[in-house]
Amino acid sequence: MTLIGHFVEGKRFVGTSERRGDVFDPATGRRTGEVALASTADVAVAVEAAARAARSWRDASLAKRSAVLFAFRELVHARRDRLAEVITAEHGKVLADAAGEVQRGLEVIEYACGIPSALRGAFSENVSTEVDSYTLRQPLGVVAVISPFNFPVMVPLWFVPIAVACGNAVVLKPSEKDPSAVLLLAEWFAEAGLPDGVLNVVNGDKEAVDALLDHPEVRAVSFVGSTPIARYVYQRGTAAGKRVQALGGAKNHMVVLPDADLDLAADAAVNAGFGSAGERCMAISALVAVEPIGDALVARIAERMAGLRTGDGRRGCDMGPLVTAAHAARVRSYVEAGVAAGAVAVVDGRDVQPDGDPGGFWLGPTLFDRVTPEMSIYTDEIFGPVLSVLRVGSYAEALELVNANPYGNGTAIFTNDGGAARRYQHEVEVGMVGINVPIPVPMAYHSFGGWKSSLFGDLHAHGEDGVRFFTRAKVVTSRWLDPRHGGVNLGFPTQS
Ligand code: NAD
């Protein structure tokens, strides 16, 4: 049995805690490892190592920092297949999907390679006679990153390359369900020349998270996970005076207007509904069909679902298992609740015959029609391969439904009417919008983040917001004396 520990100050570290978590291969149901769950004292060791490293890393030149990032990018790129295999072995998503996640993470590393441009300040000459004013963006010190199970590589990479490029030291706490991939990333970063202690990984659960939220040396926290935990992390972290961005859960709606290309919409609904077994924060889980297209759209989606192969992610299947037995049971209970509430199960994933070990955590793609807003399959984030179709009579009803939802992560509209799409992008209360694009995950040089219960805090992940989050601004006003200086003047300084 592999013991998965931590990575502190450039070395693997087991820590003093004797608490352990189980790690499974979701496609076989077998326990493949044990992860050390850090104690408060273990976290303190990592934070103190980061604090020591932060003191010198903040002074590393931009050239040196970007050289390390370029070298790291080359290593991750060369070893991307290995990383995808590790993701699939612990998360279960199919290899092609794991490779896609690595690719999106690489794009953030590439953005961070350009940190010298992103950190350029502003300079105003002669704001007053012979007085100049300019801004600097400086690192915060030690920052914590706490990530969810569903993107064990991409989500840590939304933050870590930018935090490090900005001159911070990081303590990363990945999900205890799939902890191995980021340990590789930490080792490869060290191999790329990152000084010891600038990136540390502690594995753990609530105890480790609380220790990070309470440690006075941790200046900022980037969190991604479910809404109740995001809210908790935001409240506890900000109460301790930290800067916090906490990205939460989602219920993403895809609105299909009657003039849409129904084949395009059906492809998109299947891809975004069942990719990664619905375990994506940008998965489409609610499809809002504006009548009269409901019947035609549901038929096209069901037709495509008949061709999907659920099974072991290493066998070229379309969709893998769910992450744990407990999560599979929870998602299954939602399917049961949907049937009991009167939704029409057009495709019932409980009947799936997986191409994989019978011990795996299986549930096939499920399509519900005639779902109504009070059913739990609509109100709750299921985070599984369950797509609910709601039928409405007009664009206005569709918009009202989307805007009444407490989540506001992503949404998509399918239409051939540019005016309608433009109106939707203006009126919808959601942070990321796709127009004839099902999963509108912004590129690394834009920022990723939802609204309402999908994000606590204000700055989004990566892009310019990422650079702002991991730095604080300083404004300098300077005068180099010349013979004309002088005189006592108690008036409030203004330009002259
Ligand atoms: P989760 O909230 O259970 O866990 C996230 C992190 O919080 C993990 O590191 C976990 O160890 C820690 N944690 C869990 N319980 C805790 C507690 N009681 N106190 C302190 N820390 C705790 O989320 P998950 O199941 O790993 O991930 C799925 C969720 O993440 C979904 O809700 C999904 O929508 C969301 N998500 C959101 C985004 C986004 O960008 N908004 C991206 C990916 C995932």
Image (cartoon, rainbow, N blue to C red):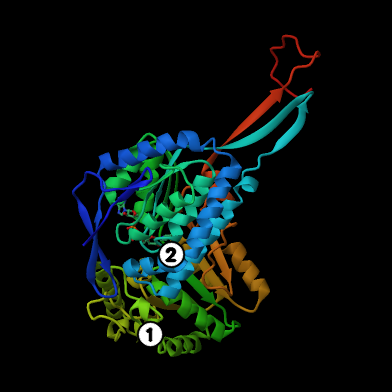
The tag earlier along the polypeptide, 2 or 1, is 2
Instruction: Tell me residue 362's x, y (percent).
Output: 29, 77
Q: Residue at x 57, y 82 (%)?
A: 258
Q: Quadrant of residue 24?
A: bottom left
From this view, report whether residue 421 is shown above or below residue 493. below
Quick one: label 2, few (<14), some, or many (20+) residues within 10 Å?
many
441 vs 365, left or right, is right
- For disc 1, the marked residue is 309
443 vs 338, left or right, is right
Dot 1 falls on a residue whose secondary structure is loop
Instruction: Tell me residue 89's x, y (percent).
Output: 33, 69
Dot 2 falls on a residue whose secondary structure is loop
Quarter of the figure that contains the C terminus: top right
Instruction: Tell me residue 67's x, y (percent).
Output: 57, 49
**Dot 2 beta carbon under 8 Å from ligand 1:** yes
Q: Residue at x 29, y 86 (%)?
A: 353
Tag 1: amino acid: Arg
Q: In this view, which residue lies farthest toward the left?
A: 18
Q: Quadrant of ligand 1?
A: bottom left
- For disc 2, the marked residue is 281
Does the residue at mark 2 contact the one at mark 1 (Cβ under 8 Å)?
A: no
Q: Is residue 41 visible?
A: yes
Instruction: Tell me residue 70's x, y (percent).
Output: 56, 54
Q: Residue at x 45, y 87 (%)?
A: 304
Quick one: label 1, few (<14), some, or many (20+) residues within 10 Å?
some
451 vs 306, left or right, is right
Q: Is residue 105 visible?
A: no
